[in-house]
Image (spheres, grey):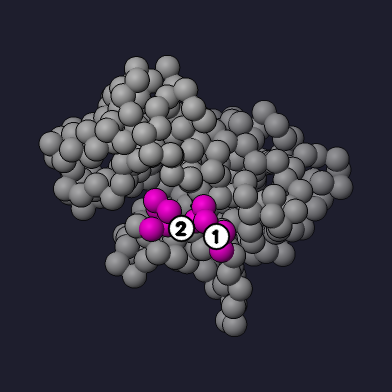
Amino acid sequence: MAAGRAAPEVARTEAALRERLGAWRRGGARIGLVPTMGAIHAGHLSLVDLARARAQRVCATIFVNPRQFGPSEDFAAYPREEESDLAKFAARGVDLVFAPEPAEMYPQGFATSVTVAGLGEALEGASRPGFFTGVATVVTKLLILAAPDVAVFGEKDYQQLLLIRRLVADLSLSVEIVGAPTVREADGLACSSRNAYLSGAERARAPALFRTLRAASREIVSGRPAAEATIWGRESLVEAGFARVDYFEARDAATLAPLAAGWRYGGSAARLLAAATIGRTRLIDNVAVEP
Ligand code: PAF
């Protein structure tokens, strides 16, 4: 454990979480929530910093949510490193960690899910059926349970961030959602728990995802039609050694709706988003289309 910082208290049950947060709230503290699936890296810690700047008490969650993994995805292999996660949270000043077992979150008979139509169906939603319903269900539950004043999510999962903003507005949840800029390694690769799956050779090729997104964004800003730049982006990723490109698309930055045919920079704000597989690892990233 890092010197000078007490280990955060760990709540394993909904009752323990409610009791601790309720006491802090009654004492007048603003509560910040940072939901994670663990395997904590610099990106997660930047979310903690943003929560700490906006709240007196910070609660992080560690829950590898089975409902957001498809049958052929990496639920079993997903890294579980609770001890080192707690040490990292302690060093960053997290006050409480909620780390429930699946049966605590989804007890026998659990039958409710939250689906965000439209936004949840494109891009990641099209490539990973059921993924966003799993995310929306667990995030709704965490927001109801913790009732935070503010919750922080990374822009690396840009579509997820928009979807969470949508469900919070639609369900009238009283929480401020803050988006945190993507934290990157020195070579541009976005921090992700799944980077741990990459072999040495794959890791060396992986930064091409961000480089290609940035290059396509520059092309669009200099006048190239978005449709042409995204075709170039897909081809470039394949040339860079990505085995499969699920999507490389420019979308409306606020709604993720497809851009009009022939769209060029200067219209509505746009975002470039990509998902591609290198070896057996699927990586996602996105950039704003701006100078
Ligand atoms: O982004 C993640 O780590 C997860 O999708 C989240 C928001 C913690 C829900 O399980």
Other residues around mark 1 within 10 Å, as few (<14) / some (14–19) / many (≥20): few
Residue 22 in the figure: left or right of residue 232: right
Asked if the residue at tag 2 contacts the one at tag 1, i.e. Cβ–Cβ closer than 8 Å, the answer is: yes
Magenta stretch: helix, strand or loop mostly: loop
From the viewer's perspective, tell me whether residue 94 is left or right of residue 175.
left
Relative side of 287 to 188, left or right: right
Q: Identity of the amino acid at label 2?
A: Glu
- Disc 1 Cβ-to-ligand 1 distance below 8 Å: no
Residue for badge 1: 117
- Above or below for 121 versus 150: below
Q: Position of residue 154 (x, y in %)?
A: 51, 39
Question: Does the stretch in magenta take in 15?
Answer: no
- Give residue 265's quadrant in the image: top left
The numbered disc on residue 106 is none
Instruction: Answer yes or no: disc 2 within 8 Å of ligand 1.
Output: no
Q: Amino acid at mark 1?
A: Ala
Label 1: which secondary element: loop
Q: What is the spatial separation of the Cα atoms under label 1 and label 2, in whole angstroms?
A: 7 Å
Residue found at x 36% / y 53%? 79
Q: Is residue 233 visible?
A: no
On the image, the x and y values in percent for residue 213 come to 32, 31
Question: In this figure, which residue is indicated by the disc labeled 2?
Answer: 121
Is 102 positioned to the left or the right of 207 in the image?
right
Q: Residues within 10 Å of mark 2 (few under 14, many from 20)?
A: some
Q: Which residues are magenta?
A: 115-126
- For the point 60% across and 61% down, the residue is 12
